[in-house]
Structures are given as C-alpha cells and as structure tokens.
Amino acid sequence: MNNFLETYGQAATTTLGLFWMAFWAFGLGYLISSMIQVFVTRERMKKSMGEAGPKSVALGTFFGFISSSCSFAALATTRSLFTKGASLIPSLAFLLASTNLVIELGIIIAVFLSWQFVVGEYLGGLLLILLMWLVVKITLPKSLEKKAREHARQEEGDAETSDVPDWKKLIRSKEGWGKVAHRYVMEWKMVWKDVTVGFTVAGIIAAFVPQSFFQTLFIGSGSDDPAFWQILMQTIIGPLAAFFTFIGSMGNIPLAAVLFGNGVAFAGIMAFIFSDLVVFPVLRIQAKYYGWKMAAYILGVFLAILVSAALIMHYGFAAFDLLPDPSTAKSVTEREFFKVDYTLFLNAVFGFLSLTLLGWSVKKHGVPNSEKSRLSEKILFWLAMLAYLWLIGGLIAFAL
C-alpha cells in the first residue's frame, strides 16, 4: 500500500511538473497564434488562395503555419477554405501545416524533447504536405472531391465572405488588441481538456508503467540497432497509440517524451506526434463535413504519408548520424521540476499576462461558455474532471 501511495504521489507531481515546464511555452505560443489569427483573418486566407496548383499549396501551407494548432479549429477552417473554392490538395496542405508547422508546437517539443525532434517536426511537416500532394494527385477521383464539396457546402451554408479588415488599423487599435485577448482565452478554452488529460496520462504512464511494457508494445524499443521491420512496426504502432489517447498534438508531447525516455525510436516518436489527425474524433468530424467516403479516403492518405514521412526522417537523420540517443533521455520522474530558474521567471510573466488577458476578455465578452455539443468534447470534459480528482488525491498521497 505504501508503495502504491508513493507511486501515486510521484505520478501527480510528475504531471504538475510537466505542466510547470510547459506553461510559459503554451502562453507564448498562444499569444503569437492569437495575434496572427486576429490580424490575418480567415477572410484574407480565402481571398488569397486560388483553386489549384503550386501557388495554392504554398499559400495553404503558409496560412496553416501561422494559424492555430488546435485540430478542431483547423478542421473548421479547412472546411471553410474547401467550400470557398480551394481544391482538396491546398485545403489539406493548410490542415497539415496548421497542426504540424505551428510555432507553439515547436516550442513545446523543444521544452520536452531534443532539437532533432523540433527539426523533424518542421521538416517532417513539409514532407507530409509534399507526400500528400503526390498521393492525392495520383489517387483522388474527381467525383469524390465534387461530392465532398457539395456535402461540405450543405453543412456550412453558402454565406457571403465578409470584408477583409485593414490589419494596419486593427493592430494600432484597442479593439484589435481586445480581440487578441479574447482569441487568447478561446485558444486555452479549446485545449484545456486535451492538456489536462494529456499531462495526467503522461504522469501516470511515467510513474506506473514499467519499461518492459514499452519494449513489448513498441517492438525493438531500447535496442541499439533495431532492424528496419522493427522501426516500421513502431511507426505503425505510434498512430495506434495516438488513436487510443485521442488527446491532440499539444497534450501528446509530454507523453512522447515518456515514450522517448523508454527507448522508442525516433521514427516511432515522430509517427506518434504526427498522428493527431488520424484519431477517431477527427475522423468523425471529417465524416460530418465531407461524408464518410471522403473521410475514409483522407484517413488512408494521412496514415500512409505519416508512416512514410517518419521513416524518411529517421533514416535521413541516421545517414548523417544525427539520430537522438534515447539512452541520454532523462526519465521525466527523475527531473527536478520546481526550482528557481528561467522557467519560474517566464511562468510568472505569462501567468500575469494570462490573467490580464482573461480579465480583458471577460469584461468585454463575458465568461466563455463550455463547449459540450460534440460527444468527444463531453468525454474529454469528464475525463478532465476525473484527472483533477486524481491529481488532488495524488497530492494528498504525496503529502502523506
């Protein structure tokens, strides 16, 4: 019993420690994202993107890069772009870029993992887009794209595009920065459940799950020189693990750090990180937007390209002897989280900033309503509540 309480307390403190490490990075990322979303609007994106070709793919990638990393927000924007005339390829380029190339995700990866994973995230994100372009160009039936667009327009409606505001005037106005404050709060509103569940799961796994489990699940993990088939199996298992956590890219990073610390190969970790768009809640939303045939097609394309991209990145890094060494990874349960260093200073700054922006947003827009319309959101909400109860119990166990 004493061993359980000790491990329970360690799991809770690990969860809180992981979030302590990441809070300032979330704040910085969402501040940048909020500013871009206010001053570079969806309407500007729609007016700038053509129907097809390299220019549209490049614009879709660029707008995704500067957009939100929340999968559900990216899905909604992707549908909007698609219904306004962008072809499927630049629309999916936007979706992939908005969940793999965004600034805040790179910051979080840098906090928890090594520079190789940051480089892998951005180079791999570009590779995902190029591979998607190739696969869709070869395999997409025109009739399927036409039916999916009709389905999406019925779901969204054909409202006229609103005027594009003058960003130069907006950035100099109190109204513009008030919108940034509100957008910042809404960014947190979109991800707080994912973050809560993700960090709690990471703490539980780090404390309770033995290394032997990961070596069994991720075939070849911990091996100094895994065979190709073992690396391939890890890139397939990565998306399956992500499917069952269905947490989202930001919440999955601390869990990726746990996997890396337990010897999972670079390819397996990258496949796991890339997999936020192949989880069931995303599949269900894609089906609602475009119909089940197109949703299944997109799922198949994404699975194929993320496995391919992870393998290419792994062996590309290996060719230059740049693969990160899992044996050098420090276990998250052994880290000293709470100490006087730059993290304390940055958390204080972004804690004050977050409270200020929250107060500004509430004063103008009121308290944000909870999003409970989707079944996945309801499940995540109650999982987050259970996570808070678990953490409270763990802190009591730690104190005892």
Image (cartoon, grey):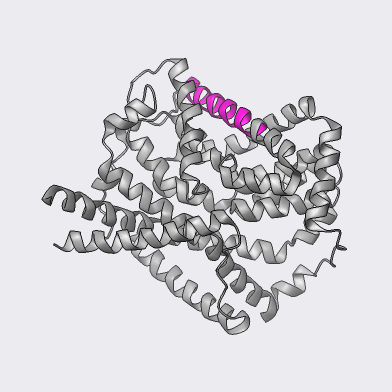
Task: Tell me where the magenta segment starts and ends, as one range.
Answer: 301-320
Please name the predominant secondary structure of the magenta segment in the image: helix
Instruction: Please determine whether, in this image, residue 124 is positioned above or below residue 352.
Output: above
Residue occupying image coordinates x 50% and y 46%: 246
Residue 344, horizontal then vertical, whole percent: 34, 64
Residue occupying image coordinates x 51% and y 22%: 315
Looking at the rendered image, the quarter that the C terminus falls into is bottom left
Is residue 372 at all visible to an observer of this figure? yes
Instruction: Please determine whether, in this image, residue 7 is positioned above or below residue 312.
Output: below
Q: Which quarter of the picture shows residue 304? A: top right
Q: Is residue 307 magenta?
A: yes
Q: Is residue 281 magenta?
A: no
Is residue 270 at all visible to an observer of this figure? no
Residue 347, horizontal then vertical, whole percent: 39, 65
Residue occupying image coordinates x 61% and y 62%: 373
The answer to whether residue 66 is left or right of residue 220 is: right
